[in-house]
Amino acid sequence: MSNSASDGQGKSNQEQIVSRPERLPLEAQIEFIGDFDILKAKGINISEGGIAFEIEGGLPFEMRLAVDEQNKTYRAELVWMKRLPHGGYRMGLKFVGEGGEPTL
């Protein structure tokens, strides 16, 4: 008998654990540039208050920021966005480039 627990679909809990890179604090001013032209989207729903839609593919951006007192440029794609209580937004972007490394 195996010592690992199962999720009922034949996968052990150990197989479900996803490793992610360590998050480090960052204090920097970032220039955030949308790297796209006109996008086509599929409408999902609409109401008097707003609209939901989907796009295919990534939503690319270029960012410029000072890291270790050096200005660097990175390419990234929007992965998630969350509305904050005070009205702003918090966004998560994934670096894109060779091997998933930030492009300099």
Image: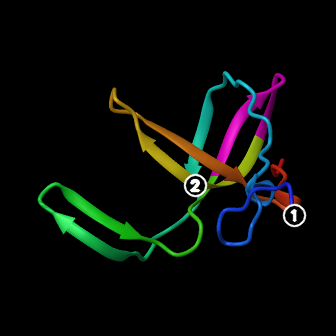
Closer-to-camera residue (14/18): 14
- Going by the numbered disc 1, the residue's amino acid type is Met
Foreground tag (2 vs 1): 1
Q: Which residue is mark 2?
A: 78
Residue depicted at x 87% and y 61%? 2
Is residue 79 shown left or right of residue 14?
left
Vertical arrangement, residue 73 with respect to residue 14, above or below: above
**Disc 1 packing (10 Å; few <14; some 14–19; many ≥20):** few
Residue depicted at x 74% and y 33%? 23
Which quarter of the image is occupied by the N terminus? bottom right
Is residue 11 shown left or right of residue 51?
right
- Mark seen at residue 77: none
Residue depicted at x 80% and y 54%? 14
Q: Which residue is mark 1?
A: 1
Q: Splitting the image into 4 quarters, where does residue 48 fall? A: bottom left
Residue located farthest toward the front when viewing the structure as drawn:
1
Residue depicted at x 81% and y 59%? 97
Vertical arrangement, residue 47 with respect to residue 14, above or below: below
In the image, the segment drawn in magenta is 62-72
Q: Earlier in the sequence, mark 2 or mark 1?
A: 1
